[in-house]
Image (cartoon, rainbow, N blue to C red):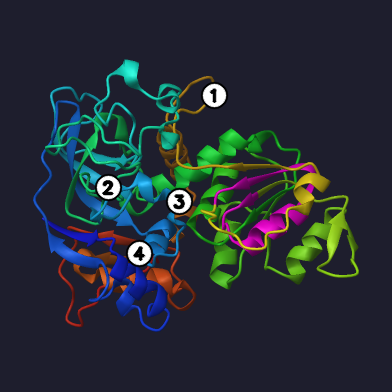
Amino acid sequence: MQAVEFKVTIPGFILARSLGRFSDLFVYGGPSGVRLVDRPVPAVPGDDWVRIDVLMCGICGSDLGNVSFKSSPAMEPFGSFPAVLGHEILGRVAEVGSGVSRVEVGQRVVVDPMLHCEARGWEEESWCPSCTAGRHSTCEQSGDEGPLPVAPDGLAPGLTIGYHRDLPGGWGEQLIAHKRQVFPVPDGVPDRIAVLAEPFSIGVHAVLRSGGLQSPGPILVIGSGTIAFATIWSLRALGYCGHLVAQAKRPHEVALARALGADEVVTPGDEARQALIDSGASAYMPVVGDEVYAGGGFSLVFDCVGSRSSMMQSLRYASARGRVALLGCAGQLRKLDLTFLWAKELRVQGYVGYGAEEWRGRRPHTFEVTLERMAAELASGSAALGGLVTHVFPLAQYRDALRAAYDHRRSKAVKVVLEPHGRPPGPRGLRRRTAG
């Protein structure tokens, strides 16, 4: 099968970090560690596994950070390479093992890419505390080899399909997944929305776990990427009725934030400051440094960027005893001033992935909640979710896809996806479809 593979090497790291700033060739071109390869079709390793033909797979900000070697190296032990990238997966079931009953051949499914101890081959008595509690996104055995017989030495280390040597991701024509990882897509949810289930589940997970639905408000969401839009949508889709302010940069992002449920959308700088003042905050100017605030503020801030500037803003804009929910993949943030963390008695909590949720008296998986709410919204006639997938490329044009995702200011991309079984390229060698 054809697949886009990423190989981590020291020369690749040096080229990407030094010459990558001058040419994207050194990030995802010929000299890089990213290339289209032929790989064997992965074998189904047991009765509880499923083979899937990939229909679509998104390009995520974490993919861009890893390919460019800009992500923190702290998570390196929890992946294994070379790996077929892609973890925002929509597919169609091609084969099921005898122990699989939730899905059947021919069904469309989305894939939870994070591996549970059971998927690694461990018996229940050997599951880690996180997996036992239904919170496998923080699996405590992901840095170790597992006993699953996919290779002579068992399963390689790795937390996530798409960053795993033995379990190829969705930037390829086929993959395999454990029955715990696959969720049927309702008939009323089209492919271009279903492929958003993974990133939108991150927003759903953060909203449910942060207590966002019970927040007295107002709430601020910082960011103009898919995770920020997922958070805005999740707050409204799950029932938050308070005042919701979004911060976005470009006109098409402002329009999307409004369509997804934001009451007010501000741009960084003066507009964002005015929204804070309108909440009842007073501004003060220290002898040295930036303006600071007291009173008012946002009871909950979702930082969906994870940069130094977004974290600084989150801490300054949160109300006294407020909360900051960190969804952006923050890494090494230099010269981050934490004064307001203690001066306002703030609580900062990071969120990753998905798992068992407490929802309406049930304990469903996050993906199930997300798909349920997507189907309900579409049934109501809402078209808000239809504007998020802006670019679709066949697998062979992965470099064009990465270019659009990296240079989203120019391309106006929100979510870029690859279509491994897509039609051949047109006469100009580029097939790009934009949402109408």
Amino acid beneath label 1: Arg
Give 164 or 395, whichever is nearer the viewer. Answer: 164
Quarter location, residue 21: bottom left
Judged by depth in the image, the label closer to the viewer, 3 or 1, is 3
Give the answer, above or below, for where 413 lies relative to 350.
Answer: below
Q: Disc 1 marks which residue?
A: 360
Judged by depth in the image, the label closer to the viewer, 1 or 2, is 2
Q: Disc 2 marks which residue?
A: 164
Give the answer, above or below, for where 324 lies relative to 63.
Answer: above
Q: Are marks 3 and 4 in contact (CB under 8 Å)?
A: no
Residue 333: image location, x then y, percent: 60, 60
Secondary structure at badge 3 equals helix
Q: CA distance from mark 4 to mark 1?
A: 40 Å
Q: Residues within 10 Å of mark 3 (few under 14, many from 20)?
A: few
Q: Is residue 75 magenta?
A: no
Q: Which residues are magenta?
A: 302-327
Judged by depth in the image, the label closer to the viewer, 4 or 1, is 4
Amino acid beneath label 3: Ala
Give 366 or 322, whichever is nearer the viewer. Answer: 322
Q: Disc 4 marks which residue?
A: 67
Q: CA distance from mark 3 to mark 2?
A: 16 Å
Circle on res. 74 = 3
Residue 181: image location, x then y, percent: 30, 34
- Which of disc 4 and disc 3 is earlier in sequence? 4
Residue 298 in view: no
Residue at 67% from the left image edge and 68% from the top image edge: 267
